[in-house]
Image: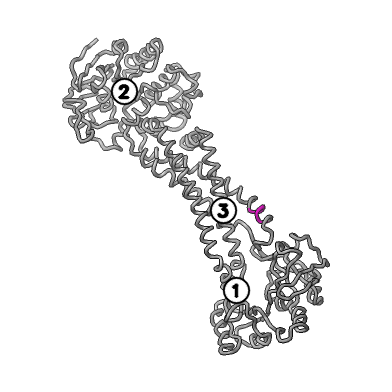
Amino acid sequence: MTPLIRIQHLSKAYERGGQTIPVLLDIELDVGAGEFVALMGPSGSGKSTLLNLIAGIDKPSSGSIEIGGVDIAHLGEGALADWRAANVGFIFQFYNLLPVLSAFDNVELPLLLTDLSTRERHDRVAAVLNMVGLADRADHYPNELSGGQQQRVAIARALVTDPQLIVADEPTGDLDRATGEEVLTLLDQLVHELGKTIVMVTHDPKAASRAGRMVHLEKGVLVDTLER
Amino acid sequence: MFLLRLLLKNAFRHKLRTGLTMVGLVVAICAFGLLRTIVDAWYAGVEGSSSTRLVTRSNISLTFALPFSYGQRLKAVEGVRQVSWANWFGGIYITERNFFPQFAVEPVSYLALYPEYRIPDEQKLAFYRDRQGAVVGRKLADKFGWKIGDQIPLRGTIYPGTWNFTLRGIWDGAEAKTDESQMLVHWAYVNEWVRQRYKGRSDQVGVYMLGIDEPNNAAVISERVDKLFANSLAETMTETEAAFQLSFVSMSEAILVAVRAVSLIIVVIIMAVMANTMSMTARERLAEYATLKALGFPPGFVVRLLFGESLLIALLGGLAGLLLTLPLAAAFAKAAGTLFPVFQVSGLTMALQVLAALVVGAVAAAWPAWRMSRIDIVQGLRHVA
């Protein structure tokens, strides 16, 4: 079966003060559709950079990243933005909700880039808020919600366009253990009930253990992969 | 609709900062409008002048008079329809602080030449019949609370002594720009007084006003008039009424340039203040713009957000400034009395106020919008972390 994500000979280096600093070196990784993969490694290992490259918000120095048959490494800025809007859902450590918008409006944001009618958009937002258990908090603003609730709004925002791929950067990093568990359970459901593919960066071995596969990086090199 | 809602919410996210910026805008736009109105008021005489009137005065200086006999010869000049004349009277009403212009004129021909001075017929006739009579503009009458029949004592400076004039009429200007701050008395009465006291100084005219049929012929007629009196003891200089008025304005040109410059500097200052506000705003929302871009929103969306917010704040501040200008200008006009014959905020000034506000908003947003549209998503997202 063709994997959803196919990464080949992927390298990334930054230029700092005339020096080239390698961050990722010749990464080879396949992620199948419906897989839940955790990227782990110490700080500076390149796991967040790899996630950013998979999400299409950063460009590799060399190599290819094929996602759903599209080599996103060679897409232009505009095409890449369109591709992200249609294919990727984002979950950030600090939720990244717009504070001036209600939970409902925050979830509706990505749908503004689609051709859906207002009615269709509202139906979808209501459905995903219901799915994450926040139907009764739709009119609340982020500062009126707990950390866990804000992260669930962010998950709803990631889900609302029905993307195949969801990238999560330390989704439980700002939450207490119990709330973090709830969020991880929700992510689990997305994989097992909706068939979503999730690539998650985490420092927390407990969080990583919820994933189907753990990929370890060290100094920009993929050192091992552990299937659960 | 969603964008508008987001703009509104963003604009008032920091109420104190937005409020202070708007207060700055209100003050700046209001000051800009008032200063422009002051400059306009200076030019009111030029604006209110007629294209069918010429002014003939001594070629040497306005302080030199012309012979009364010129009047008959002027009437004969081809293209001249009407002739009237006036002398600066220069009287003081109670105290020098009550300054207002007074002219000794030939009443019938003068009021025929100035149809914009609207006086009821019976008042006009009463003025014609009373050699000691006077007419004044409404603004002047209101300032001193004069009524028809009141005695107006003036202390003469050019014509020394105490003069008592009886108010016979009050004119209302046909237009807002018509001067209502002057007083007209009989030239013949003043001339007779001069004849009795200063032989040889009578029958002198300060300026002749000529009514012409065709504004396009103004230059030709002016030339004809000046040619007629060339090489005489009192050569003339004839120009349009607008040019004549402009010669007075040009005496204070340096002040007007300074006032104009200050009005623009105020706009530039508020532009810098608002640019700083928008830069701060953009910097604080770096992660939000990065998030929007990550979600797939194009850079143009971020640009629209910043420009929209800046223009919204600028427009609201500008409109409030404009609205505040009107009562302030009215209060200023009242306080200034007859210093400015016409002091009104023009339509052009109001339009320029709105335009200035929009330019401030657009310029203030330009740099942050450009920067935010180019932010690196990864760097922007790190900003929050």
Residue B370, percent from left and from top: 36, 42
- Image position of B87 with respect to A146: above or below: below
Quick one: label 1, few (<14), some, or many (20+) residues within 10 Å?
many
Q: Does dot 2 land on a helix, a strand or a loop?
A: strand
The residues bearing labels 1 and 3 have C-alpha atoms spaced at a distance of: 27 Å
Question: Could you say which disc has been placed on residue B33 in the image?
Answer: 3
Q: Identify the amino acid type marked 1.
A: Glu
Q: Residue at the spot x=17%, y=23% of the render?
A: A28
**Magenta region, residue range:** B329-333
User: Which residue position holds label 1?
Assistant: B241
In this view, the mark in front (3 or 2): 3
- Image position of B383 with respect to A36: above or below: below
Residue B29 on the magenta segment: no
Residue A81, percent from left and from top: 32, 34
The residues bearing labels 2 and 1 have C-alpha atoms spaced at a distance of: 78 Å
Q: Identify the amino acid type marked 3.
A: Gly
Where residue B242 sits, quadrant-wise, is bottom right
Nearest the camera: B272 or A78?
Answer: B272
Do marks 1 and 3 share a subunit?
yes
The subunit letter for the residue under badge 2 reads: A
Q: Does dot 3 land on a helix, a strand or a loop?
A: helix
Residue A61, percent from left and from top: 20, 32
In this view, the mark in front (2 or 1): 1
Q: Quadrant of the C terminus of chain A?
A: top left
The subunit letter for the residue under badge 3 reads: B
The residues bearing labels 3 and 2 have C-alpha atoms spaced at a distance of: 55 Å
Nearest the camera: A87 or B255?
Answer: B255
Q: Identify the amino acid type marked 2.
A: Val
